Image: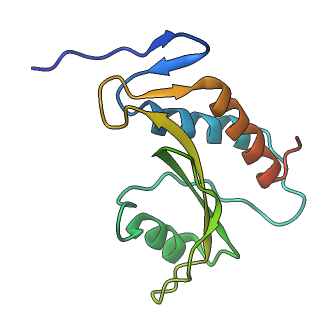
Amino acid sequence: LARAKAPQRYGDNLLAAPVAGRRAACAALLRAARGATPARGSVTVAFVVEQSFTRRGLLTIAKTRGPFSDALLLEAVSGDPPANRPASPDPENLPSYESMGLRVRYAGTVVETVSLTDAEALERALRVRIGGGE
């Protein structure tokens, strides 16, 4: 038996909940993708798992829906988020990718905290990246 932990807003636009960073990053991606109109080509938005060490989720989507010219991974991270950190191409045909992140405090706890202002900034950056404007 486990008690459900409801998200709690507090302080200056902060939100605390289990896995708040991932949830906020997913919400930012959904809002950015909704209604976006890429300037050219198409954009595939995918939510994948098993990313921590092997990038298995990205590899699976690349094999089933690719090829892709590039990819972007969102991460919830403690400390400073990666700023478009390029990664080396994978020998298993993994597309080259960049990472963008959303900073969290108290990562992995029931009070993991994310700034909703940071989540909104991530949404704007994703909208620009997708091609849906500023």
Query: Farthest residue in the left direction?
Result: 1
Q: How many marks?
A: 0
Side of 93 where 56 appears, left or right: left
Rendered residue at 48%/35% (across/down):
104
The correct choice, above or below, for 110 with respect to 48 in the image is above
The correct choice, above or below, for 30 with respect to 44 in the image is above
Side of 70 where 17 appears, left or right: left
Rendered residue at 50%/44% (across/down):
79
Image location of residue 131, percent across then percent down: 84, 52
Rendered residue at 50%/67% (across/down):
61
Image location of residue 132, percent across then percent down: 84, 46
Which image quadrant is residue 102 in?
A: top right
Image location of residue 109, percent across then percent down: 29, 30
Query: Farthest residue in the bottom direction?
Result: 91
The correct choice, above or below, for 28 with respect to 83 in the image is above
Side of 108 where 22 appears, left or right: right
The residue nearer to you, when weighing 12 against 93, is 12
Query: Farthest residue in the front direction?
Result: 79
Which image quadrant is residue 85 in?
A: bottom right
Which quarter of the rendered picture does the N terminus lie within? top left
Rendered residue at 68%/34% (across/down):
31
The correct choice, above or below, for 6 with respect to 57 in the image is above
